[in-house]
Amino acid sequence: MLRRDSERLVDAVESLADSAPDHPVSRGVFGAILPAVLALHGVRGLWRGRMPFVGGRPLRWFDLHGTEALCLAAATLAAAAFLHAHFFWTPHPRFHGYGALGKIASLLGFVAAAAGFVWFGLITS
C-alpha cells in the first residue's frame, strides 16, 4: 500500500513538468486565484517581517521573525509564481515557452529561499 502511495506522489510531481490541462476552471482557480492568495500572503510576510509557521514538538503554530520569515515569504512567492506559470501560461500553445521559463525561474527562487531558510533558521541559530 505504501508503494502505491509513493508512486502516486512521484506521478503527481512528474505531471508538473508537463503542460497543465487547458481548462478554464483549472486556469482560473489554480492559475490565478490560488497564486494570488499565496502571493498576498508572501507579500504580507515581507511587509510585516514575520510569517506563521508550524513546527516544534508537539506541533504548534508560531511566528517566525527576521531573516527566516523573509526566506519563508520568498519561498511562498516563488510557489505562487510556479503555480501561475504552470496552470496559466503553459497550457497556451503560443505562450508555452514563457510558462516553462517561469517554472524554471520560480523553482530556482524556491530552492534559494528554502536554502536560506534552512541556513538562517537551522544552521546559524
Image: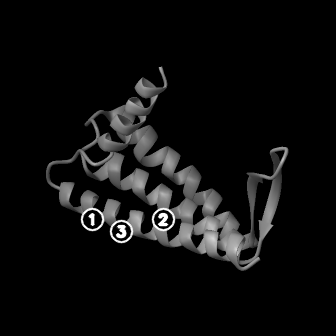
Q: Amino acid at mark 3?
A: Ala
Label pair 1/2, CB-CB below 8 angstroms? no
Q: Amino acid at mark 2?
A: Phe
Pointer 1 residue? 101
Q: Amino acid at mark 1?
A: Leu
- Which quadrant would the C terminus be assigned to in this image? bottom right
Q: Identify the element where label 2 is drawn.
A: helix
x and y percentages locating residue 16 in the rendered image? 33, 45
Pointer 2 residue? 110
**Is 29 on the left-hand or right-hand side of 71?**
left
Residue drawn at point x = 29 percent, y = 41 percent: 20
Q: Nearer the viewer, mark 1 or mark 2?
A: 2
Residue drawn at point x = 81 percent, y = 50 percent: 61
Residue drawn at point x = 55 percent, y = 66 percent: 114
Pointer 3 residue? 105
Q: Residues within 10 Å of mark 3 (few under 14, many from 20)?
A: some
x and y percentages locating residue 97 in the rendered image? 19, 60
